[in-house]
Image (tube, rainbow, N blue to C red):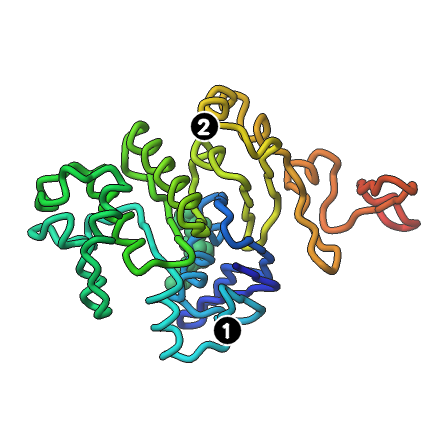
Amino acid sequence: MIHCEGLVKIFKSDDIEVVALQGLNLTVEQGEMMAIIGNSGSGKSTLLNILGGLDRPSAGQVNVGGWDLLKISDDQLVEYKRNTVGFVWQNNARNLLPYLTALENVEMPMLLTGKLDRAYAKQLLEWVGLKDRMHNKLHQLSGGEQQRVAIAISLSNRPKMLLADEPTGSVDTSTSDQIMKIFREVNRELGITIVIVTHDLTLASKVDRVVAIRDGLTSTEFVKRNPNLDLATVEGALNGGLQEIHEAFVVVDRVGRLQVPKEYLEAVGIDGRASMEFDGERIVIMAPKSLEGDK
Ligand SMILES: Nc1ncnc2c1ncn2[C@@H]1O[C@H](COP(=O)(O)OP(=O)(O)OP(=O)(O)O)[C@@H](O)[C@H]1O
């Protein structure tokens, strides 16, 4: 569904350049539900905006559902956004219309694309658990309920992929659990690919795969050890952190590049240069063996 290779995004303003993505690689299969984690400023939102067609990549390859997002024309981009992607943001309420009902809000994007389907709009609200509240005006709903309306809206154009940026960022734990259950159901029932960007490891542990981004590059991947683990087991194991449930892998790109955590480099005193040895089974990276004249 998603294939990025060597993806670069540079923001230029006056004479300052920020390289937000530095040649990022990422593959997401059709129907996968995965999360992207990373510190603030690591490039998560930049990546999501590019995948959603809200921002243009600077260089590299990025293909989503057969669309080449580097070469796509402006008209095609409109079509792409309309038919391929759905978005869920942290503060969706600001994009909803408070004096319309939940149902009218879900129907609005359908009206805009000339494809009104009331039965489907009702079904979506039922899916997100708001069957009994669909005729309530938005401002009569709680924050968590509004977020669920936003999820129904994001699915109204029948997207192939759902992009969620901190979707549980401003709701309580039980609403957050409810939202993750909705995502899982939508993923299973409709086969929609779901990509969630988050800081929240609890949330990350509820998906099949987690990719960590560091400095604009994919650095580590966590893959669920047992794909059949149910949510209760996952929650029980959570105290042990992400690695209890997921196995961690270092991402190595096609030409052999990988990122070594800064703590490891500092611990063994590697700074800018290292020695590498291969013993037939393992590759060992260590502080440089001193050269003559070198310190
Ligand atoms: N429009 C922009 N113009 C200039 N620089 C930008 C722009 N958008 C993002 N950046 C820079 O790109 C880098 C990556 O930002 P991004 O918002 O993608 O990070 P993030 O991982 O989503 O962070 P957060 O979790 O805080 O949202 C940061 O250094 C940021 O300052």
Give the residue at mark 1.
Answer: 70
The amino acid type of the residue labelled 2 equals Leu
- SS class, disc 2: helix
- For the C terminus, the quadrant is top right
Q: Are marks 1 and 2 in contact (CB under 8 Å)?
A: no
Residue at horizontal 24 percent and vertical 69 percent from the top: 113
Sequence-wise, the earlier of marks 1 and 2 is 1
The amino acid type of the residue labelled 1 equals Leu
Query: In the image, which is nearer the foreground, mark 1 or mark 2?
Result: 2
Above or below, comparing residue 260 to residue 87 in the picture: above
Closest to the observer: 196 or 84? 84
Query: Where on the image, by quarter, is ligand 1?
Result: bottom left
- SS class, disc 1: loop
Q: Is mark 2 within 8 Å of ligand 1?
A: no
Q: Picture coordinates of residue 236 (x, y %)?
A: 48, 19
Disc ID at residue 231: 2
Q: Picture coordinates of residue 140 (x, y %)?
A: 9, 40
Q: What is the spatial separation of the Cα atoms under label 1 and label 2, in whole angstroms?
A: 38 Å
Q: Quadrant of residue 156?
A: bottom left
Q: Quadrant of residue 131?
A: top left
Q: Picture coordinates of residue 258 (x, y %)?
A: 69, 50
Closest to the observer: 285 or 282? 282
Above or below, comparing residue 264 to residue 259 in the picture: above
Closest to the observer: 226 or 254? 226
Residue at horizontal 29 percent and vertical 47 percent from the top: 151
Compared across the picture, whether 152 is left or right of 10 comes to left
Please identify the residue farthest to the front as the structure is shown: 119
Disc ID at residue 50: none
